[in-house]
Amino acid sequence: MYDRKTLIGCLLAAGLAAGLAAPAAAALQKCVDDKGKTHYYDRVAPPECVGKPTTQMTNKGVVIKKTEGALSPEQQKAKEEEVLQSKAEAQKLKDQQRRDKALLNTYTSEKEIDLAMNRNLEPIDVAIKSIEPRLKNAEDKLAKTKDADAEREVQRLKSEIAQKQQDKARIKARFESDKERYRELTQKK
């Protein structure tokens, strides 16, 4: 058999375990069904509460935990879209911060941005100037011969110049945007 100390130790441990378990067992659950009726239960949820948001409370009514109920397919889709939108916004903010840091680390003044823009525009201007004499020659040849090959060459060269002009416009817009953002960032400091 057990000696007296062992028996007392076991009884104390059992009593302590029961005492700790009592508040958990005494916790109440609460839910509101589709008709607006509030249901209270301690262990097994009534059928009206299945999938509904629940509130777990102490036996004195203090809220311990709230649990969301099952979402309808529309609610689930809306929640997923909200999460995706939130992630996209967070990524957009992170990307903007990265670009801002790169901008501030690359340039020390607006004048440097203008110089960088001019360096990027220079090769395009050179390319356009090299195309212009060829275009003039092709147009002269077309005027004299009305040759289909000359006409295609004129169209190709004009298209090439137009593409270069679009490239210039994109570069200018990008650097102007960078300059404006640089101005905003440096004025904040």
Image (cartoon, rainbow, N blue to C red):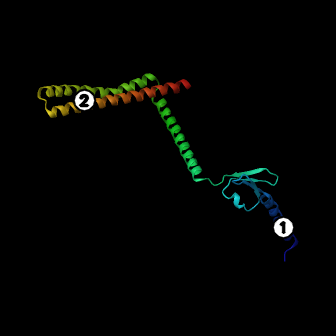
User: Which callout, 2 or 1, points to the residue nearer the camera?
Assistant: 2
| Residue located at (82% from left, 65% from top) | 13
Return the residue found at the far bottom.
Answer: 1
Q: Position of residue 110 (x, y in %)?
A: 45, 23
Q: Amino acid at mark 2?
A: Lys
Q: Give whichever of 34, 66 is nearer the camera.
A: 34
Label 1 crowd (10 A; few <14 / some 14-19 / many >=20) = few
Q: Quadrant of residue 40?
A: bottom right
- Spatial CA distance of label 2 from label 1 is 99 Å
Q: Left or right: 58 with respect to 116?
A: right
Quarter assignment of residue 153:
top left
Vertical comparison of 94 with 123: above or below: below
Q: Check the picture and name the quadrant holding the C terminus.
A: top right
**Residue 61, position as x, y percentages in the image:** 80, 51
Q: Is residue 189 visible?
A: no
Q: Secondary structure at mark 1?
A: helix
Report whether 179 appears left or right of 130.
right
Q: Nearer the viewer, residue 149 or 31?
A: 31
Q: Residue furthest front?
A: 35
Q: Where does label 1 land, which residue?
A: 9
Residue drawn 56% across and 45% down?
Answer: 82
Residue 158's label in the rendered image is 2
Q: SS of the residue at dot 2?
A: helix
Neighbor class of circle 2 (other Cα within 10 Å; few <14, some 14-19, many 20+) is some
Circles 2 and 1: CB atoms closer than 8 Å: no
Q: Is residue 28 above or below residue 173?
A: below
Q: Amino acid at mark 1?
A: Gly
Residue at x 33% of width, y 30% of height: 166
Q: Position of residue 87 (x, y in %)?
A: 54, 44
Q: Quadrant of the image for the N terminus?
A: bottom right
